[in-house]
Image (spheres, rainbow, N blue to C red):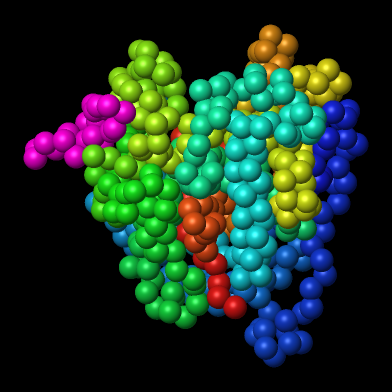
Amino acid sequence: MKRPSTGHSDPAAGPPAPADRSSQDAPSRNPSQDPDRGPRQDAPREYALDGAYDEMFTRDGQMRPHVRSLVASFLGLPKEELIRYKRSADLAFLTQGITFNVYGRGEGTERILPYDLLPRVITAQEWRHIEKGLTQRITALNLFLHDVYNQGKILSDGRVPREVVYSCRHFRREMRGLAVPRNVYIAVAGSDLLRVGQGEFVVLEDNLRVPSGVSYMLTSRRVMKRIFPQLFRDSAVRPIEHYTQLLLSALRSLAPEGRPEPSIVLLTPGVYNSAYFEHTYLARQLGVELVEGRDLVVHDNVVYMRTTAGLRRVDVIYRRVEDDYIDPLAFRSDSIMGAAGLFNAYRAGNVTLANAFGTGLADDKAIYSYVPAIIRYYLGEEPILPNVETYLMTDPAQRKYALENLERLVVKAVGESGGYGMLIGPQSTAAQREDFRRMIEANPRNYIAQPTLEFSRAPCLTEDGMEPRHVDLRPFILFGDKVTIVPGGLTRVALRRGSLVVNSSQGGGSKDTWVLSD
């Protein structure tokens, strides 16, 4: 497969030259000659190391130093004991209700999250780089949203085309000129990272509307600590359990003026939503009420929650409902998920929503291609975490290149998530490529294309032993008084052999993510 360049391609330019296919790990010292590193450990003979960067082994089969003690602990366990630990983890997920819903499947909708016991390990140095890059990114995207919905300087200066912004279905004209508390449009984000080439991290996409998955990160850690308590004590893994306290602090900091003890609720679409477990889990951990649209009422532009003791004012709504469905008076009139008049209360400054209305503009996959330019424009800095090469189908030259090379590219609908609305060229049929060709030609604005990524793999414990599987990483970023990121994230795993799709709804699973202390 083709490895993408990690630089950003100018959307106004034609297709970039083919990326360099050579992706060799930098030569390492032989740890057998270094007493501080311990004895050399090699990959099992049957473990495939060709192709993508491996999170555990170098290209010559040498185990990376920071994972040696961890792997030795796992590989020293009898197979029967590993099976027992895996069953214990599965039982913990089941009893805690750690599930997700899959739509459109005849065999049922609710499933236990597939889980791999062998954690993904990230060094302290790598994490500092990720943290710095994500802080830069969310800061620039917040500035971009504030500018677009107010002065529009970046549009006037031609750094981002007006037509790309105004044609985005998540752009909300109703937000123009509205004051947003602390100018924070994106309070909660979950950007998807891939490791490519010789180990560099790139941003695949930004999830800014209603990012999900943090409950799986937190519950996975809880399960792992219960099963392997000694391993955690020995490995110096940085904690993530304080995420909900950080989230609560960020939400409180965005409360309307004059509300020093704000009432906060979490707004869910309801029990049939694919992330309902997460909604209930976070509400319980935050100590806030979980509400549906029917639980809210708006009177004189103030939002109230119905309770057994009467109406109670609401100051901050952590919403897990999309813009379109949150207020039938302002957006979709057929929605029963929201509360009538909610947008007017927001516009009056009597309630704060996290994330703000219109935030989805910044995670549109066409806008994504301009994020490096957005960072340079507002911060005067080069992107720390680069984008993946992206072809805009609205550009005739780039569209022509993509249509001629569909068998080598990944095509995505700009507003879809969860692995839906996507064509993976090398794994597609001629009929599927023809269908996407027609859809692209009919609506170019709705699609982008990217090279097929040969992203990193991590070892997983399977019935056949330890085998490599492709992984991504979704860290969770909070923006209130300041930007905070807990050291870790949701590592998603393409559990099917050879698969590039990590989404749980498409057969993927997850791992615990361990960030090591210095």
Of residues 455 and 147, the one drawn nearer to the viewer in this rendering: 147
Name the residue at the front extreme: 258
Residue lying at the far right in this picture: please name it: 17
Seen in the image, is 174 located left or right of residue 264? right
Which x, y percent locates residue 200?
Answer: 73, 56
Front-lying residue, 271 or 355: 355
Side of 259 where 3 appears, left or right: right
- Residue 40 placement: quadrant: bottom right
Q: Quadrant of residue 300?
A: top left
Relative to 376, is 362 above or below? above
Identify the residue at image location x=69%, y=90%: 35
Determine whether 143 is above or below 464 in the image.
above
Residue nearer the viewer, 207 or 401:
207
Question: In the rendered structure, which segment of residues is drawn in magenta?
Answer: 291-312
- Magenta segment includes 309: yes
Image coordinates for residue 14, horizontal then vertical, percent: 88, 28
- Give residue 397's position: percent from left, percent from top: 86, 21
Query: Which residue ends up furthest to the bottom in the rendered image?
Result: 35
- The residue positioned 62% from the left and 55% from the top of the image is 135
Look at the image and tell me in which quarter the C terminus lies.
bottom right
- The reply to whether the magenta stretch includes residue 96 is no
Majority secondary structure in the magenta region: strand
| Residue drawn at (37%, 52%) of the image | 252
